[in-house]
């Protein structure tokens, strides 16, 4: 059985970047190797003081030539970070379940089981497939948040074959930030075609924030994001994502109160449609309606009173609250390939009792809400277009019955819609765990080449002039690390980047004389946004230094702009490769 060895590397400093605003030094970091007789959960659960407190806050996984395994869930009751060190080819360390003596498979990697804690997962390949290839179906959930007011940040990870949910939060007012992450091949739960979801609120509690940027959801059965289960969602941001081949609706976000859904690609999303028996209440909150990619509804009285607390005693609180909602849906592309739409047509023409309502971009209820500026003055919708991004040819091969794609999407659709679904699976280059102790997943991801689409219109169609969808496929995302010093500056200073010129990384340092909201962005010489380091984030007084890695960017002059409490400074730096 594969297992792990760990060592404390005294000279190692892991910088938990921008989002957590926490720096872990040598005494807080345990380096873990994947080559001894303990599983990852055993190492972390044993890493405690005599009083039960966690010794280290960060666990650095450095092995990429074999996988890390877990035999039980890691249960965290304090801040935790599990961060991988990328290999020379960008390969992240892989974590997978063990097979227990009773032949069962652990269903969950990480449980966040305390209120108010912070957690971070970065540079990891997290698969639900065990060391023999089996999956805990249908109960596989990668991460479960049980505490209230928990902050989880996920960056540059891959989640594969989590048959129920990849990320599941059950606490009240949790905050999730998911960046640069791939969710793939989550359509394998035996007989349960309505799960296989990326991010799901299942606890019936409110959501503080769900922010998702530069992610790809490829061949998963259900929601990319579900921040709504009947309670309030304060903020939802879904920007620069690819949703490619999904059976159900990509978003369950009916009653969001403040939201941005911009610059995404929805390709073959909601391709399972809605059967006549499912209509009108399937995936609807209150008003019966045929589902669509963008699908909103009104607030109920309870949510309206929470959202608009100052008018909570007003008999007209629902309408007053609706007028304060702000939802922005801009510059998205959506498309269903002809082979699929022809299949739908043929299916419905045969007068099946299980014929379907085919999906649309925006149903009539939602369209009316955006058009009614009296009731919903904060709803804005523009620049959305039905355009084929022109992915590589292999992407639509998921429709076909081939060994690497399972039964294919069309056969899977037929099995679901004729109520004969049992063990059928579909996906794209499904991973097959090889025997032996040194199996690792395919890398680079086999879809990397063909998800870089070629439609020239969409390559500059986003709100910031860049390609729609996940920018990682175009090499346009830079990594960032933060270092904070608790100093007492007397003035607002933006320093020259150092080194400058640089290759491929440089450090941007600034001082804040008082607490304030900070935005730090990098532009190319033509004024196009390259990356956002900070976006109106509240920062304490002190000195900040950001290490920005621009290895994926071309040589040239770049501008970095810092905005703080109504003031702005801009400087130049040069990337020379």
Image (tube, helix red, strand yellow):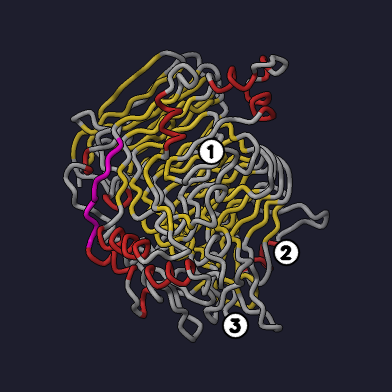
The residue that disc 3 covers is: 1
Quarter of the rendering containing residue 337: bottom left
316 up-or-down from 303: above or below: above
Residue 254: assigned label: 1
Of the two numbered discs 1 and 2 on the same chain, state the one appearing first in sequence: 2
Q: Give the alpha-carbon distance from disc 2 to disc 3, as whole Å.
A: 19 Å
Secondary structure predominantly adopted by residues drawn in magenta: loop
Under tag 3, what secondary structure?
loop
Label 2: few (<14), some or many (≥20) within 10 Å?
Answer: few
Q: Is residue 297 magenta?
A: no
Label 1 neighbour load within 10 Å: few <14, some 14-19, many 20+: many
Q: Residue furthest front?
A: 351
Q: Position of residue 394 (x, y in %)?
A: 26, 67
Q: Mark 2 or mark 3: name the one nearer the start of the chain.
A: 3
**Is tag 3's residue or tag 1's residue first in the polypeptide sequence?**
3
Q: Which residues are magenta?
A: 384-392
| Residue found at the far left of this picture | 456
* Percent x, y of residue 448: 30, 61
């Amino acid at each position: 059985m594969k297992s792990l060895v760990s060592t404390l590397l005294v000279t190692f400093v892991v910088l938990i970047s921008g989002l957590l605003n926490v720096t872990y030094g040598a005494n807080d970091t345990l380096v873990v190797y994947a080559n001894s007789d303990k599983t990852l959960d055993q190492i972390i659960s044993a890493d405690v003081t005599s009083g039960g407190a966690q010794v280290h806050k960060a666990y650095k996984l450095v092995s990429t030539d074999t996988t890390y395994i877990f035999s039980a869930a890691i249960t965290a009751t304090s801040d935790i970070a599990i961060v991988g060190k990328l290999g020379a080819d960008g390969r992240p360390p892989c974590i997978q379940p063990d097979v227990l003596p009773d032949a069962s498979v652990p269903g969950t990697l990480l449980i966040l089981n305390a209120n108010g804690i912070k957690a971070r997962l970065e540079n990891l390949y997290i698969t639900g497939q065990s060391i023999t290839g089996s999956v805990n179906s249908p109960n596989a959930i990668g991460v479960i948040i049980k505490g209230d007011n928990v902050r989880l940040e996920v960056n540059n990870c891959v989640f594969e074959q989590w048959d129920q949910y990849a990320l599941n939060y059950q606490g009240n007012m949790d905050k999730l930030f998911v960046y640069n992450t791939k969710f793939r091949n989550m359509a394998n739960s035996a007989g349960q075609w309505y799960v296989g979801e990326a991010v799901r609120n299942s606890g019936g509690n409110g959501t503080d924030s769900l922010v998702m940027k530069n992610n790809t959801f490829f061949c998963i059965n259900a929601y990319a994001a579900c921040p709504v289960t009947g309670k309030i969602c304060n903020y939802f941001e879904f920007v620069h994502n690819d949703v490619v081949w999904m059976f159900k609706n990509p978003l369950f976000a009916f009653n969001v109160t403040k939201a941005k859904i911009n610059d995404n690609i929805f390709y073959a999303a909601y391709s399972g449609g809605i059967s006549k028996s499912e209509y009108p209440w399937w995936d609807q909150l209150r008003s019966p309606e045929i589902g669509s990619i963008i699908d909103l509804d009104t607030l109920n009285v309870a949510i309206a009173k929470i959202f608009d607390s100052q008018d909570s005693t007003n008999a007209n609180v629902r309408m007053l609250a609706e007028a304060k909602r702000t939802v922005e849906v801009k510059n998205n592309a959506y498309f269903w390939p002809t082979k699929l739409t022809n299949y739908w047509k043929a299916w419905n023409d045969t007068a099946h009792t299980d014929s379907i309502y085919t999906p649309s971009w925006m149903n009539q209820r939602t369209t009316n809400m955006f058009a009614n500026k009296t009731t919903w003055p904060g709803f804005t919708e523009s620049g959305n277009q039905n355009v084929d991004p022109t992915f590589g040819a292999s992407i639509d091969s998921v429709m076909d019955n081939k060994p690497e794609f399972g039964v294919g999407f069309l056969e899977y659709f037929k099995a679901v819609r004729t109520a004969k679904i049992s063990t059928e699976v579909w996906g794209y280059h499904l991973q097959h765990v090889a025997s032996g102790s040194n199996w690792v997943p395919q890398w680079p991801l086999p879809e990397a080449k063909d998800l870089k689409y070629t439609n020239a219109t969409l390559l500059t169609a986003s709100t910031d002039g860049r390609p729609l969808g996940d920018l990682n496929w175009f090499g346009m995302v830079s990594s960032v690390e933060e270092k904070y010093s608790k100093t007492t500056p007397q003035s607002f200073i933006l320093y020259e980047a150092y080194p400058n010129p640089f290759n491929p990384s440089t450090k941007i340092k600034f001082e804040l004389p008082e607490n304030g909201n900070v935005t730090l962005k990098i532009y190319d010489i033509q004024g196009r946004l390259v990356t956002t380091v900070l976006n109106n984030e509240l920062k304490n007084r002190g000195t900040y230094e950001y290490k920005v890695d621009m290895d994926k960017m071309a040589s040239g002059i770049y501008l970095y702009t810092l905005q703080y409490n109504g003031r702005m400074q801009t400087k130049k730096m040069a990337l020379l490769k």
